[in-house]
Image (tube, grey):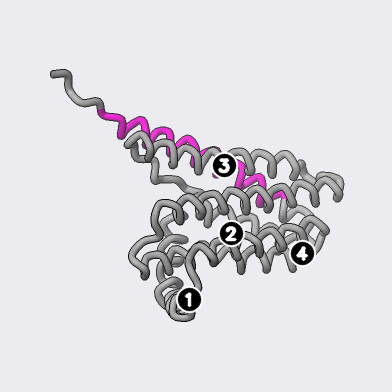
Amino acid sequence: MAKIVQTTARAFAAYGIEPVARLLLRIGVTPNAVTVAGTVGVLIGAYFGALGHLLAGTVIVTACALTDALDGTMARMRGGSGKFGALLDSSMDRLADGAVFSATVYYLATEGNPYGGVVAALISLVAGQVVSYVKARAQSLGLNADVGIAERLERLLIVGVGGLLGAAGFTWGLPAALWILAVLSLVTVLQRLISAARSDVKAPAA
């Protein structure tokens, strides 16, 4: 699933995002500014979702989440974002993810926690943070953990589908999406740990 989504995303970037990225760079907008603006947009969308406006919240979050591809494309066009740009991007991603799932927990709690959705949302939140941490920590140790069935884009898409189902009146839609996401996120953590373990080849003793 991750490969299919990533391939589609690359095609979308080539035909939809790159012209926008060129325009923004031409008028002086930096990738870091796009990163921060996208995160602010996600926070606004999460706020609408928490209040029960699932359609508006889902549309805003999804639209602003696309800036994750936009700022990366802009950085590549400029020849790289630098270490601070990478740090800022990762930090804003964690903030945005936390806002989305916190808003989801709040909304489901006010709705009476249908189908145990709050538990699924909390599992998804924690597991999603661990997914990102394992990859970052593995890279800092020289290990390879760049695998997984549910990376950030897939996680946001699954939540988005659940939000749209909820907005359409299917009360089971959002909890069902969250339970699927919770399982896939835990599987992804396991996949990355296994990949890191396999890449941990010790140098032979002298």
Residue at (62, 47) in percent of width and height: 180
- Does the magenta portion include 146? no
Q: Kindly state the secondary structure of the residue where label 3 is placed.
A: helix
SS category of the residue bearing label 2 = helix
Indicate which disc residue 129 carries: 3
Nearer to us: label 2 or label 1: 1
Quarter the C terminus occupies: top left
Q: CA distance from mark 3 to mark 1?
A: 33 Å
Q: Secondary structure at mark 4?
A: helix
Instruction: Name the image quarter holding residue 168.
Output: bottom right
Name the residue beneath numbered marker 1.
Answer: 28
Per the image, the residue denoted by label 4 is: 167
Q: Which of labels 3 and 1 is toward the front?
A: 1
The answer to whether the residue labelled 3 contacts the one labelled 4, judged by CB atoms less than 8 Å apart, is: no
Please name which of the two marks, 1 or 4, marks the residue nearer to the observer: 1
Give the CA separation, mark 3 to mark 2.
Answer: 16 Å
Q: CA distance from mark 3 to mark 4?
A: 26 Å
